[in-house]
Amino acid sequence: MLGLNKKDFSLLLVVAALTLFAPFILNPFPEGSGMAQFNAGYPDLMQRFVIFGIFAIGFNILLGLTGYLSFGHAAFLGVGSYSAVWMFKLLSMNVIPAILLAVVVSGLFALVIGFISLRRSGIYFSILTLAFAQMSFNLAYSVLTPITNGETGLQLTLNDPRVLGQSATADGSIPVTSLFGLEMRSTFEMTLGPWLFQFNAGYYLCALILLLSFYLSIRIFRSPFGLMLRAIKSNQTRLNYTGLNARPYTLAAFVISGMYAGLAGALMASMDPLAGAERMQWTASGEVVLMTILGGAGTLIGPVLGAGFIKYFENIFSKINDTVLHGWFEFMPDGLENLIVGILHPFIGKGWHLTLGLLFMLVVIFLPGGLVEGGQRIAKLFRRKKPDDAGDNAQSTPAE
Amino acid sequence: MGILEVKNVNKRFGGLQALGDVNLSVAENSVHAIIGPNGAGKSTLLNCLVGKLIPDTGSVMFDGQSVLGRTPYEINQMGISRVFQTPEIFGDLTVMENMMIPCFAKRDGAFRLHAIAPTDDEKEIVEKAERMLEDMNMAGKRHMPAASMSRGDKRRLEIGMCLAQEPRLLLLDEPTAGMARADTNNTIDLLKQIKDERDITIAIIEHDMHVVFSLAERITVLAQGTPLVEDTPDNIKGHPKVREAYLGETA
């Protein structure tokens, strides 16, 4: 189906179902219940899940297949955002031209940076990409202020030309981003008993693009090009002595992953039309590395899981505060309650980074294949209970 | 004129003269062995042929064209394949995938962006790779990760990968180093079979005299970076200069 084998196609279907029903899946707890704060099914966060999923899928094409670790991919994300916002300022509020321009510009940007950085491999390549990204960040912050609006960040104003659209709406406010008239912020709310489900146009656009990106990434993984990229990771000496030039392959992978990052940046700007330099900072580059490794570098679904996991932590776990903890441990005697809350205090709220860091360490040490390997081990445990089913273990390992 | 002509090649590493005025001519469709004691410059010479090292002076011509200044992959595309002392294969990939890569390289050249064509649809490549695996008696191992195989099988796969490119010159750098006797004999049989069945020139660097004398048609003896003699195996066996180089003057 669609040029995919049965297994890959069912994986695609699973991802399609997950994204389609995400507003239900992420909102398992009724409104107003104590657990409602763990609901992640609101538009803003769901958009972030899929946008960072796209970012990580693209990053994985570089890291997972070729093994080249880039520490500068946030630069492409930022470039994509700036391009998109400029399109909103100059052309129209339609997201399609903004996304197209962002992908093209970030691709060109990746071509230049990749051409230089890929002259080295290993740690030197990582440092070169990091240097380029930090340069971009500082330029965006200072010298390039006419293009990036410096510290304030690039925003829409009522004076923007928008030659194919309108500078201001009838009631004198800035127009909102849309897809041929369908506003990205428009949300359909459905109340089912105590549950509230929100279906957001912007989220579904992002989800659709995530599916397309995911499909493309499967095709790349299974193509001769993907085979060559894995060969580069495995043994560059043999590749060279087999008459193949590694440089154009790695450059192509770098540009493709840069375009994915630009696409993610454009979607961010499409959901919320502003772009700031901090989007290009090295912490943002590091985040996508964490997502990919946490989920499982070199696997198809891993980066998406990793992105979801980290964004969930960032947005949900960070909201747990001492008051919430006191609520949970109310049943205990006062002294014990205070003790437990005191112990847990550094790990919650603003301390969520600590918890995430510990989890990341555990995953890297015990599950080098990331969350995907964890899933496989659990699946294997269940399978072992059935006797003659051990044969197709080799088949269940995603590309790596 | 041989298919490979090395003329007056010199290579110096600091104070060490690794190669001094090496002249070598390898005749087309022959098996030519290069032997010599440790440090004689055999590997340096080989590296000069495949583009890993560039000689200080002299020329290396393959089929009338100079290989100097070209990168390893360009030289490989000219028709020279190299087997390494320790098998260099794609350990993370399956045996079948290993074999498909040289098939792609032969058909598509150094780079081609077929980023979304499913690999399975490349019927001619799959068929050729399968045929090569059968030739190498490895069809049963096609789904194994290459790294999990024995040393002898890795060597066999590496030779097969080189042959899949249909090279005109196959360079082997101590192909039986570190192998058990049985594996060594298998490798000798494989190379004999290759020599009989294909139009191919083989140049082999080897320590093991058993391997050299069962395969070679011409032998060049290298000592201290300079060729001592070049002759047929029978004449080399009793040559006084060879004995001297291997056993020292007092012997």
Image (cartoon, grey):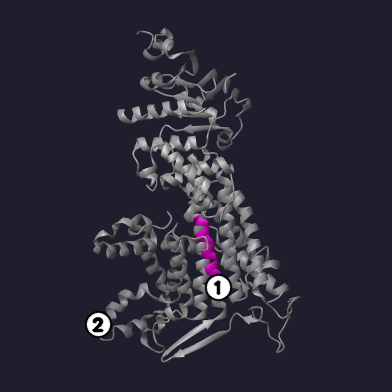
Which subunit holds the residue at mark 1? Answer: A
Location of the C terminus of chain A (image quadrant) = bottom left
Q: Main secondary structure of the magenta part?
A: helix
Asked if the stretch drawn in magenta spans residue A7, the answer is no
Q: Position of residue A118 (x, y in %)?
A: 57, 48
Can you see residue A68? no
Q: Is residue A109 left or right of residue A10?
A: right
Q: Seen in the image, is A227 located left or right of residue A169?
A: left
* Residue labelled with disc 2: A335
In the rendered view, tell whether residue A351 sits above or below residue A391.
Answer: below
- Does residue B137 appear in the picture of this structure? yes
Name the amino acid type tagged 2: Gly
For the point 39% across and 12% down, the residue is B237
List the residue tagged with mark 1: A206
Q: Is A147 positioned to the left or the right of A8 in the image? A: right
| SS category of the residue bearing label 2 | helix
User: How many numbered dots are placed on residues in this image?
Assistant: 2
Give the image location of residue A98, x and y in percent.
66, 70
